[in-house]
Image (cartoon, rainbow, N blue to C red):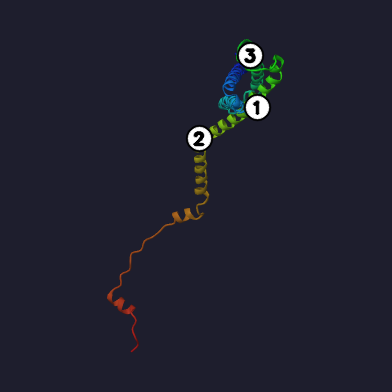
Amino acid sequence: MNAWLVRGLGMALVHFVARTLLALAIAAWPTQGSILRIVTMVVVILVAVIWGGIDGINDRRANPDPDDSADLTMVWLKASVVAGLLSGAVTWIVSTVSPIAITANSFIFEVTSGAAFTILLVFVPTILAVGLGRLLAGRDGKKNEDPRPSKKTKKNADDRELVGAGAQSEYSRPANQDEQSDADTEQFEPVKLQKDDERSSTWQEPR
């Protein structure tokens, strides 16, 4: 089964259940109709956001390159159309054959204006959630990258250091180093002075 069809059927079911529960809640608490409608709309939007966010995260993890990303815009556009048309038609049928007054609108209204509202209610939140999910998954992927250099890079750096060290040791050696090392050195024994020599070498005042 196609991905857009699965999502369309799922969101149609969510929308139909939400409208059915709304009708039952309004019948029980007629004075709270406005609040109940807002809560129902928030629930439907929340389901769409969660589903779209999961799709965005999974797509970014499967395709780290944005150019290889799946076309989730078309997937969710088709799913939104299915959800709008199907939920509107089913809602009108159930309202006609059952005592539950889910809607008082005509069939044409449910598959045109009502379906258009449902399409926007599903499509816009899911597309925003897909983009947010891809962004979060992309940041997590960058954080999980190993910042340490690879073994190959480290090896190349060590090779460059060795080459530089060899060149420095060859050309930075003094030019006369070989001459100094080849020169003959002689060691002379220390001269010992005798007592007479010591006397003659000392300073004597004139008489």
SS of the residue at dot 3?
helix
Hey, which residue is sitting farthest top in the picture? 97
Is residue 145 shown above or below 73? below
- Tell me, for residue 95, which label it has, or none: 3
Q: Nearer the viewer, mark 2 or mark 1?
A: 1
Name the residue located 40 percent from the left edge and 59 percent from the top edge.
185
Q: Earlier in the sequence, mark 2 or mark 1?
A: 1
State the residue in front, 146 or 193.
146
Tell me if label 3 and label 1 are in contact, CB under 8 Å: no
Q: Which residue is mark 1?
A: 124
- Tell me, for residue 146, which label it has, or none: 2
Question: Picture coordinates of residue 81 (x, y %)?
Answer: 67, 19
Q: CA distance from mark 3 to mark 2?
A: 59 Å
Q: Earlier in the sequence, mark 3 or mark 2?
A: 3
Tell me if label 3 and label 2 are in contact, CB under 8 Å: no
Question: Picture coordinates of residue 197 (x, y %)?
Answer: 31, 76
Question: Picture coordinates of residue 74 (x, y %)?
Answer: 66, 21
Name the residue located 69 percent from the left edge and 21 percent from the top edge.
116
